Amino acid sequence: MLKINSLSKSFNKGKSYALKNVSFDLKAGDVCAIVGESGSGKTTLVRLIAGLERPDDGSILLDGNVVASMQKFIQPNKRKIGLVFQEYALFPHLTIIENVLYGISKLKNKKLRAVEMLELVGLSEMESRYPHQLSGGQQQRVALARALAPNPSLLILDEPFSNLDSMLRMQLRNEVFEIIKKTGVTVLFVTHDTQDALSVADEILILQNGKVVQKDAAANLYVKPNTLYVASLFGNTIQINKNLQAAFRCPLNEDCCHAIRNEKIMVNPSNLDSDCEYTTNAKVIKKIVLGDTIQLLLKLDSGEQLSVTTQDNNIEGEITIGFNSKDILEFK
Amino acid sequence: MKQVGNNIETFSLKSKFKRFKRDNNRWSVFTLAIVLFLALPIIFIGVELFAGPGETWGHILEFLLPDYVWNSLYLIIFCSGLVLTLGVSSAWFVSRFDFPMRKQLEWLLILPLAIPSYIVGYAYAGIFDYGGSLNLILRQLNLDFIRIEIMNRAGLAFVLSISLFPYVYVSARAFFLNQANNLLEASKMLGVSERKTFFKLMLPLARPAIVAGLVLVIMEVLNDYGAAQYYGVNTFTTGIFRSWFSLEEPETAVYLSAILIVIIFSLILFEKWQIRKVKFTSSKTNNTQIQRIKPQKSLRFTIFFLVLIPVILGFVLPVSQLIYWSYLTASTVFDLEFLIISLKSFGIAITSAFITVFFALLLIYFSKWSALKFIKNVARIGVLGYAIPGAVIAIGIMIPTLALDKWLIEFLAKFGIETGFIINGTLIALFYAYAVRFLAVAYNPIESTALKVDNSIPDSSKVLGVGNLKTFIRIEFPLIKTGVFSAVILVFIDVMKELPLTLILKPYHIDTLAVKAFEYASDEMVMEAAIPSLFIIFTAMIPVIFLNKLLIKK
């Protein structure tokens, strides 16, 4: 339903690109998360899709129709996209119900639809209040109701939870996606938080410096990351460089880059797992208690330093660490 | 860096042209049209230069031009010095020290802005005149051998400075209040003395703000006609008037205007260059209020008197003189005709305020809706009229409208329709001129409130299927109402006070309060000028206080 072809956007006439050659598809009914650090081009991408920016190159197709290309540009108000902004962007001088009604003024039974939407987000009794009288989470839900009211073919959420603290965030995330699931709308969901993405998305698209580095099912990203960057987004990862390869006596293909997840490194494996393939000796030089896990800063015999996590509080002094070849991540 | 895929072509000329074709919408064209419309007076002055100078140009060049240049330069230098001293010192005193009646003085210092310079000029002429207020007082004290002659260049410079210093005061104070506190505290922590903090830290930091205020003062000095004419000082503006009305040589007026435009644009470029060189001020506004020092009693009263001086000179003295004159002339001046003039003045000012604000809104929003980046810079050109003296704008409108009217009359005559002038000498020309001259006055407050509305608000309206115009009417306008309202008021005041442009372009049968005051003064009836002057001052005063609140918020 959404097709992006080698989309590029630069804000300084080509000196650098906010987005470069981005291509991907989205099937109807999918929930896709766009993940990337700030400055990776996530927001630029959704603004281009919504029609709030114009591409410098490439094209965007919605339901098979070109909405933006080098020749053509369809105005945002003609695209039938729902967009929930990071800062909600509710109209401060309109009541909640007026906000929801705003986008459906041409609808016959608009009032009914608006009330229905407010019921969906559980705010029907607040309809005559003004946005500033609502909490952040409530404003968020009004923004969602407003975006869903015109029955958009695509719903975009731009960092919808970044203004909230972590407890509220998790609760609201679940609520919002339960609402969305009920409507069955296709969703593009921008976040810099991998937890957000993993917990709700069918598919995740990773952006780095304006380029797509990987687009895959959520489960695959953890197991088969394309790059070290993607791997490290989904958990602490240690690159197995030449020195580490020597220390663990595990020669690896020189043309590739290899890494191991922190949690896959076994501490004193002889006690836990007798068939650990690669091992080396190390000395604990610092121990940081992080609640239920413990982070150990180790110094290998070869002089390398690395940190691992364990749950055993009694580990000290000289230890053995190791990992298995099946856990090694390999990148081209 | 190596380009990948089709991006090699992304910024080729061909791609740029493709995108230009895609992005060029009607709003870009409308913006360009409005800017062109507002720039017409200046363009016409440029075009008219090719017609060659008038007969007396040689004479003017030889005998008068050096006088114009020298007098204008003298006024600029003298006024700059005095305005800086008064404006910066009072701004520093009120923002750094606590002293008796500080809060009242803080806004009293702005009030001189409510009095047009020419009216301050009339009042001071009355005070220092032989048989004037000062003379009467001195005679009581047997000191009447002291006689100060004010009707000269130095007197004019004094009058202009005393009425214009608030421009510097306002911008310097805004800087001291909003930006300076953390730096002040840092300086204090480092053990630097108060005096050194001011001269080594605050003054250099405030320079861009001070220069911005100073440039406004200089533009007003160059714009002034009424005071210079009354004090008999030849400046560019009086020169333009003389060549237009006395010599009846529009070509010469055009040449003088062109020189003045060049001078002013160099001034603007100088300011831009100056501010680029020293852009230290952080864009973040500092929320902590400046901590005022409470000096010991004697110093406290010294500061109080120092700050009181500009208020007395710029407001209390001239207004008292005017009130005294009004008392003397009330019976002769205050009649039905005067009331009609007041109402007409009021009507003209309010109508042109609405027209000007309308143009400002068009320019701000059309350029916003245009998808071409450079259009936003083009829109700013439309605002430059504030820098052009009223007399110059008037000349730039007079010449083309005369030609257009002649053509229209001939054209309509072919169809048997007999008309007089349609544009020239009518209110249309006057409203147009006010819009050109005061667009910036409307543009800036509207733009600054519009900037406070987060882009995501209109954006979300558009995503919800509502077009630009409807988004403006239903969402943006309700949110910028206060900015629009203050813009209307500010333009209203400026039109009420305006003299040179009005004198040249006003319809024959219509007078404004400003024109009436000027005519009385020119007819050796300066006392009678007091009542219309006071009317202008009081209509301007209430909004000036309002403007002060607005500026503090900024």
Image (spheres, coloured by chain):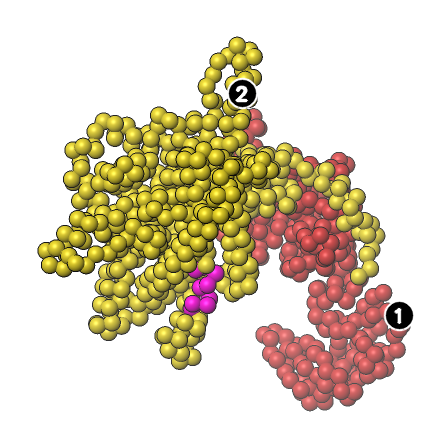
Chain colours: A red, B yellow
Instruction: Identify the magenta region.
Output: B202-210
Where residue B4 is drawn, which disc sits there?
A: none
Residue nearer the viewer, A296 or B85: B85
Instruction: Give the quarter of the image for residue B144.
Output: bottom left
Q: Amino acid at mark 1?
A: Asp
Q: Position of residue B554 (x, y in %)?
A: 42, 54
Rounded to the nearest whole Å, what is the CA distance between mark 1 and mark 2? 83 Å
Q: Amino acid at mark 2?
A: Leu
What subunit carries mark 2?
Answer: B
| Residue B205 lies within the magenta run | yes
What subunit carries mark 1?
Answer: A
Q: Provide the residue designation for mark 1.
A: A255
How many other residues sit within 10 Å of disc 2, few (<14), some (14-19) or many (≥20)?
Answer: some
Q: Is residue B28 above or below residue A108?
A: below
Q: Position of residue B360 (x, y in %)?
A: 49, 39
Where residue B408 is drawn, which disc sits there?
A: 2
The secondary element bearing badge 2 is classed as helix
Q: Can residue B268 be seen in this snapshot?
A: no
At 57% from the left edge and 54% from the top edge, which residue is drawn? A161
Q: Can residue A161 be seen in this snapshot?
A: yes
| Residue B263 lies within the magenta run | no
Q: Is residue B76 above or below residue B98?
A: above
